[in-house]
Amino acid sequence: MQKKPARWSSSDQALRAVQVAFDVEGAVLDAVRRAAFDNHLSNSDQIRTLLDLPTADKPKRPRLTVSLSPADYELLAVRYGLDSQDRLSIKERVTAELIRFAQPDGC
């Protein structure tokens, strides 16, 4: 068996962590999401806070995620007049649209 590099040892604990999903009613989902939003936390960190579990001290990079299929890229390429393989340009256009959405006047 090969010995792993020393720099990987810090990830041992994370490798043993298991993601747990909770099947709860919509009101619980809404309450956790609202609290997370109000507290500027991820849903996961909000749950950890509720359970008095530690959370990461260093701030996470704020970002939004969405899963896009090849068909989604095709639709977005048509929307923006781009090649569907030019995913970086599509991402830049989506980012610009999200920024416009967040502006108070929506423009």
Image (cartoon, rainbow, N blue to C red):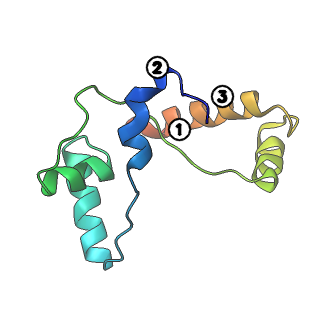
Q: Is residue 61 visible?
A: no
Q: Position of residue 59 (x, y in %)?
A: 29, 27
Tell me the tag on residue 92.
Answer: 3
List the residue tagged with mark 2.
7
- Are there few (<14), some (14-19), or many (20+) residues within 10 Å of tag 1? few
Q: Mark 1, mark 2: which one is toward the viewer?
A: 2
Q: Quadrant of residue 14?
A: top left
Q: Earlier in the sequence, mark 3 or mark 1?
A: 3
- Are there few (<14), some (14-19), or many (20+) residues within 10 Å of tag 3? few
Tell me the tag on residue 45.
Answer: none
Q: Mark 2, mark 3: which one is toward the viewer?
A: 2
In the image, farthest residue toward the left: 52
Please tell me whether mark 3 sits on a helix, a strand or a loop.
helix
- Are there few (<14), some (14-19), or many (20+) residues within 10 Å of tag 2? few
Q: Earlier in the sequence, mark 2 or mark 3?
A: 2
List the residue tagged with mark 1.
98
What is the C-alpha distance between the residues marked 3 and 1?
10 Å
The residue drawn where x is 54% and y is 27% is 4
Seen from the viewer's position, the closer of residues 98 and 28 is 28
Seen from the viewer's position, the closer of residues 98 and 12 is 12
Please tell me whether mark 2 sits on a helix, a strand or a loop.
helix
